[in-house]
Amino acid sequence: MYMSICVGNPSVELTLSELQEMATRQQQQIEAQQQMLEQRLRYLKQQDHTQGQTVSEAEKLQRLKERVECQEAKLKKIRAMRGQVDYSKLINGNLCKQCSNHIHTCLHARTHTRTCTHTLPC
């Protein structure tokens, strides 16, 4: 059986088997294109998922950075407070030393005064 198909100007006659072969090749091309499109779709979905993970990882990293900055600020405050405590201890130590020296001087003077009054005749 012959069919007449016009392609451009010349007239081409194809047999039924030639038409079936052409249809089979076209069907195979369509299936190959469909497989490529499905593969591309899977790839794009995977990329979208990966980018979503990357975004969430970036958000986690940002939150961690913020927590580190907060902890560093707290540590700085604690160190400043510790410095104030150390300074207060130093001042208190100096005051205690001065008080002790003053008490020692007073006791020494009092002892010296008592010794002098006992040795002097009335």
Image (cartoon, rainbow, N blue to C red):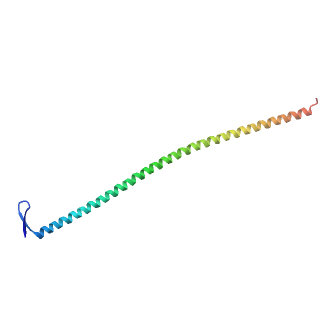
Q: Is residue 109 left or right of residue 76?
A: right
Measuring from the top left, give residue 1's x and y in whole percent.
7, 70
Measuring from the top left, give residue 93's x and y in whole percent.
70, 40
Q: Is residue 80 left or right of residue 4?
A: right
What residue is at 12 percent from the left and 67 percent from the top? 19
Which residue, as the protein is rendered here, is positioned at the far right? 121
Q: Is residue 18 left or right of residue 43?
A: left
Query: Exactly how many numbered labels are in the figure?
Result: 0
Q: Quadrant of the C terminus?
A: top right
Measuring from the top left, give residue 8's x and y in whole percent.
7, 59
What residue is at 82 percent from the left and 36 percent from the top? 107
What residue is at 24 percent from the left and 61 percent from the top? 34
What residue is at 34 percent from the left and 56 percent from the top? 47
The correct choice, above or below, for 68 with respect to 7 in the image is: above
Camera-nearest residue between 7 and 79? 7
Camera-nearest residue between 114 and 18? 18
Which residue, as the protein is rendered here, is positioned at the far top? 122
Q: Quadrant of residue 91?
A: top right
Q: Quadrant of residue 100?
A: top right
Measuring from the top left, give residue 46's x and y in whole percent.
34, 58
Q: Is residue 36 left or right of residue 78?
A: left
Which residue, as the protein is rendered here, is positioned at the far front? 1
